[in-house]
Amino acid sequence: MTSPVLLRVQAAAKPLAIAVAASTASAAFSASAYAQDKKLDSVVVTATRSPQIAKEVLADNVVITAEDIARSGGTSLADVLQRQRGIEIARNGGPGTQSSVYIRGTDNKQNIVLVDGVRVGSSTSGGASWNAIPLSQIDRVEIVYGPLSTMYGADAMGGVIQIFTKQGDGAPALTASAGAGTYGTRNAEAGVSGSSEGLRYAFRAGHERSDGFSATKPGNFSFNADDDGYRNSSASGQLAYQLAKGHELGATFLHSELKSQFDSGPTMDDRTRTRVAAYSLYAKNRILPNWNSHVQLSQSTDHSRNNASFGRSEFDTDQTTISWQNNFTLGTDVLQAILEHRKEDVDSTEPALVRDRTTKSVALAYQMRRGAHLGALSLRGDDNSQFGSRTTGSVSYGYRLTSALRVNASAGTSFRAPTFNELYFPNFGIPTLRPEKGRNAEIGVYYEDGTSQYSAVYYRNRLTDLLVTTPVCPVTPAAFPFGCTYNVNEALLTGLSLGASTTFGQFTLRGSLDLQDPQDETTGRQLARRAKKHGTLALDYKAGDLTTGGELVFSSARFDDANNRNRLGGYGLLNLHASYDLSKDWSLFGRWNNVLDKEYELARLYNTAGSNVFVGVRYAMK
């Protein structure tokens, strides 16, 4: 189990009221603008913080729709992400335990997670509390690969994952589902959405629980044979009102509370309570025909309460952000100007961590469309009260060889801010640590003709001033008896990411393959928990009311530690799924995960689920 120093103080949220400045504009980049578009599957929001036709997005990306989520058979968000190209995961047990997500070989702390445009995550441990973000509240996910610090600031070194909750549109509609499966897993969820006379609304609630299985294996220093289950209750909502054409006010929220068990020793029933929440108020105005302004005031919380064999602990992060984004249309081009202020507040049972820091940001971006030529240029400055100023930039170019075939090339810089644990934890943190820096270049080929999609992207991402835990601290070793985190290493992440999907008759064939070399250049060793090969292969079949399919998820060997002494074997998992429409509104669904009961590890001496099934019934008013 992770030590108390590095324990993932996962997520969460105590509800907080927030107020928005009622001037121009809407939620800077996500929910409202996204909901306006009629063809959601053909639009990507995250790459430029504004809705953009997918074929014109220069950044490498993947979109996961509600149908993809239902078909995947995943029991958690991390499970669904694991099936996407460029994504790997690690987890300390079942779905309710601590999870990490790696994008193109970067660390869990080197990516950003947004919920309806609101940044979520822990400022103490770094990264999002993946286990506490409920799959039942998610309508769509966008993954944008590569450095996006020019759009979002610190930590966007490997990419950005944005989660969208349900949007309201059209006549009132009810949805509900319930199911049960292996390990005593059961869930229920329900929602309502619609729009009328300028008002759009969507609300959803869900509850899930599982008896689970033991998180640890014999040999783990924290082994306990008891089952480690979880309970999660969650709700989300969006409300928007169009005051006049081009003028909208709205609010969004997501609230989730996870109560889970884990193992930190052989004699105690260790428990943690994690709350994750994201709230926003926004206004959107079209000030002039070519000037759209968006203002968003948001707050996210990531709160953790741990009761374990090593004692009780609390780690709370609150982030408050106000952003103002202005889009100016110049013919077929768009000029963006962004102002942003973000404050991170940390409260904890560890007094040294009770601090705050602020970041003031300004960014400019220009997107060009000239016939077959596409281009983008962006520059951002971030002024942080703890580590000072950082400037990042990016440039991209794309050329359409045909209406279906396009080539892209891009280069960009990024950085990651040290976490509060790395800076201030007693006998471990060093307040003078510098941010990590990244420099990425990539080239890609994309093909889409309405029936088939193919992509191939080669990337090279060099990371410097890498923060690693050293057993002997370079700064006054006597003050750090257990080592410290320090800027000592460099890493080079190179890879080829391949994706394909094609439909023929009643079949759809999908697949991905990542060939990568995530290397610590200082030591010459492979980065921990990252494979050199991983991918998926899936075949779906639809005939009348029946939809069924299977999927293979595979990975080569990895190492659990930076010294490459503890090997994690490769694995291949076979998953099956099926659904049957009983009527226009009712359907049955089922999934069988890990059909061959493969025993494998995502973290050394931590268990993963064996062969398991889940069946349920779904109602969706049509």
Image: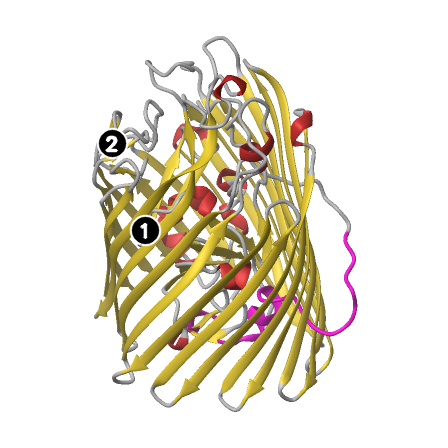
Q: Secondary structure at mark 2?
A: loop
Q: Quadrant of the N terminus?
A: top left
Instruction: Assess disc 2: are there few (<14), some (14-19) or many (≥20) residues with their C-alpha within 10 Å of its C-alpha.
Output: few
Which comes before the other along the chain, label 1 or label 2? 1
Return the residue at label 2.
Answer: 597
Q: Residue at x 33, y 49 (%)?
A: 83
Q: Is residue 171 above or below residue 190?
A: below
Q: CA distance from mark 1 to mark 2?
A: 19 Å
| Chief secondary structure of the magenta portion | loop
Residue 107, quarter of picture: top left
Q: Which numbered dot is residue 578?
A: 1
Seen from this angle, which residue lies furthest front? 476
Going by the image, does 505 lie left or right of 427? Answer: left
Q: Is residue 542 above or below residue 181?
A: below
Q: Is residue 72 magenta?
A: no
Instruction: Assess disc 1: are there few (<14), some (14-19) or many (≥20) residues with their C-alpha within 10 Å of its C-alpha.
Output: many
User: In front here: 222 or 349?
Assistant: 349
Q: Is residue 32 magenta?
A: yes
Q: Position of residue 309 (x, y in %)?
A: 54, 13
User: In front here: 582 or 84?
Assistant: 84
Q: Is residue 563 above or below residue 289?
A: above
Q: Secondary structure at mark 1?
A: strand
Q: Position of residue 293 (x, y in %)?
A: 67, 75
Q: Residue at x 70, y 40 (%)?
A: 14
Q: In the image, which residues are magenta?
A: 18-42
Q: Position of residue 322 (x, y in %)?
A: 70, 59
Which amino acid lies under the numbered mark 2 shown in the image of this protein? Answer: Asp
